[in-house]
Image (cartoon, grey):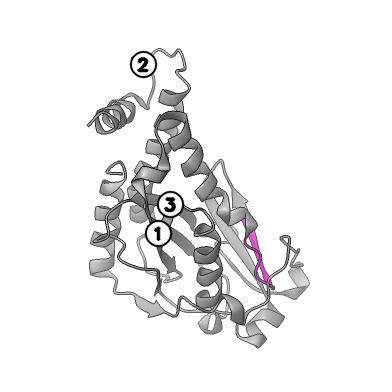
Amino acid sequence: MKLYDECFAGVNAVLEKYPAEKLDSGTADKWEKTDKNKIVFQSDTAFELGGGNLPALSSVAFTDSHDLVPCDEILLIGGDIADLKADSPFARIALIRVDENGMGTGEQLYQTIRQIEFARYHIHPEGYMMRISAFTHREAARVSKDAVRKGLSFSHIGSFFIEEYKKQSQVEAVKLLFITADDFPYDLLEKVMEKSESITAALDHIMKNLKMDCGTCNLKAVCDEVEALCNK
C-alpha cells in the first residue's frame, strides 16, 4: 500500500509546524450514539464546524506501514468542542493502517477502500450532526447546545470513528487528525489530500477499464503512477 505515501509525508510535514494535542482514543462507550443522523435544528445549535464558507475538509489515506500509523491515535490542532464559542473552520483527516494482504487487488481493492471510507456514514454521536458532501469532500457538523453542556469532545467523536473503521477486518490502526485552529493553512492541507482522492478515483477508472481518451483526461498522470505502483 504505497499508493498514498505522498499524502502521509505531506500531513507529517504539516504536523511538524503545527504541534497537535493527543486525545484519549478509548471513550466511545462514554457518549451516547444514535442509529441515524439526527437533525440538530438551528435553534438548538451551539455552533457549526465548517459551516457556511468556512473550510470543512475531510479525507482519508491508507498505508500498510507500522511506522506511519503505529497505533490508534486521535490528534487535535486548535480548540476542542468545549473551547469553541462560535462557528469554526474544520478538518478531519483519517490515516489508516491496513493489512495489505486483506485489501485484495483490482476491483476488490477499490471496493474495500470505499467500504472503509463509507464508515463515516454510520457514525452518529448524540448532539453531533454531520453534513457530508461526497462530491466536494466537505464534512461539516452541527454541535448541539445540549452536547456542549454535557461535555462532548473530539475524543468521543474520534473514538466512534476508530471503532467504526475497525469493523472492517482489514483495518489495523487509525490515526485521526481534527483541526479547528483559525490560523491553520487548510488550503495547503487540502492540496495534500487531493492526491488521495485522485488516487482512489484513478483506481476506479483503471479497474472499470473505462474507454477514455487518456490524452485529454486530467487523471492520466495519476493513473500512470497508480498502475506503476500496483504492478511493483
Residue at horizontal 43%, vertical 55%?
171
* CA distance for labels 2 and 3: 26 Å
Residue 214 in the image: x percent, y percent?
A: 36, 16
Residue 107 location, x and y as percent? 47, 30
Q: Return the residue at label 1.
A: 172
Could you tell me the amino acid type at mark 2?
Cys
Q: Does the magenta stretch include residue 127?
A: yes
Residue under the image location 44 percent in, 33 percent down: 201
**Residue beneath disc 3:** 60
Alpha-carbon neighbours of circle 3 within 10 Å: few (<14), some, or many (≥20)? many
What's the magenta region?
123-131
Check contact, mark 2 vs mark 3: CB within 8 A. Answer: no
Q: Where residue 117 sits: x, y (%)?
A: 51, 49
Query: Is 185 above or below relative to 2?
Result: below
Which amino acid, mark 1? Glu
Indicate left or right for 153 with 3 as reference. Answer: right
At mark 2, the secondary structure is loop
N-term-proximal mark, 1 vs 2: 1
Per the rendering, the mark at residue 214 is 2
- Looking at the image, which residue is at 40% across and 68% down? 72
1 or 2: mark nearer the eye: 1
Is 21 left, or right, of 137 in this rendering? left
Residues at marks 3 and 1, CA–CA distance in whole angstroms: 15 Å
Mark 3 residue type: Val
